[in-house]
Amino acid sequence: MEPMPFRDHYGRDLIIDICVVCQGLWFDGTELLQLGPESTLGLFRFIAEHGGNPREMQAVMACPRCRMRLVRGTDRARDTIFHYARCPRDHGRFVTFFQFLRARQFVRALSGPEIDELRRRVRQVNCSNCGAPIEINRAAACKYCRTPLSMIDPDQMSKAVQALDEAVLRRGALDPTLPIRLAEARLRVERAFTSADSRAVWDLADNDRGDDLVRSSLRALTKLFG
């Protein structure tokens, strides 16, 4: 894993360990809860740039601090359930890129009409969680990990950018142009997904080969942020 610097809610230094090969993040202690909105969006951009098909996870994983066997766990962020592997001595938890996006409610399952529209356009996509192929005409969820067909939630992305805007203003940002730049970023997110029928997603699905909808949406947003 490679350590990367971020900030907590109060602007203090926070080091997150990231493994691109495993497509996962290690949060010491309560770092996942301490992650500020600016850092959350920073991690979102990192995942968009480095996300790929995840490597199959080992049946037994060890804590990088004490080497004890990690225990599978489940948590809930409002109405969204996400999964992780935690150290029994509370040294931290390992969260995959996809599960982090779920924990921050950036990902939502496709609705019935969206799945029907997707079936008219493509035959197969990859699971956003484990990378396995999903035959859309046969199922609306991965047969291996049971993750439903998912996409980036545009409303939640817009809220995240707004939260960043408000957090920076509360800290008294020194850069007077920052609120304007953040407002522009929020508008770009909103404009990216203004269509109720998610045409941006369908266009990406038409052009991508063997990809998943979450990665397609991530790439689209990365281009918008520049």
Image (tube, grey):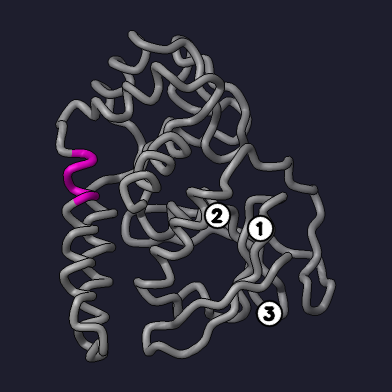
Q: Is residue 181 left or right of residue 109?
A: left
Residue that carries the numbered disc 3 in the rendered image:
91
Residue that carries the numbered disc 2 in the rendered image:
83
In this rendering, the count of numbered labels is 3
Dividing the picture into quadrants, the one containing residue 159 is bottom left
Q: Nearer the viewer, residue 132 or 207?
A: 207
Magenta extent: 188-193
| Residue 191 placement (x, y as % from top left) | 17, 43
Evaluate if marks 1 and 2 touch, with contact meaning CB atoms under 8 Å apart: yes
Q: Is residue 88 left or right of residue 128?
A: right
Q: Which mark is residue 72?
A: 1
For numbered disc 2, what is the local secondary structure?
A: strand
Query: Nearer the viewer's eye, disc 3 or disc 1?
Result: 3
Q: Nearer the viewer, residue 26 or 148?
A: 26
Q: Callout 2 environment at 10 Å: few (<14), some (14 to 19), or many (20+)? A: some
For numbered disc 1, what is the local secondary structure?
A: strand
| Residue 101 placement (x, y as % from top left) | 44, 53
| Residue 48 placement (x, y as % from top left) | 48, 48
Q: Looking at the picture, which amino acid does disc 1 mark?
A: Arg
Q: Looking at the picture, which amino acid does disc 3 mark?
A: His
Dividing the picture into quadrants, the one containing residue 184 is bottom left
Figure check: 148 above or below 92? above
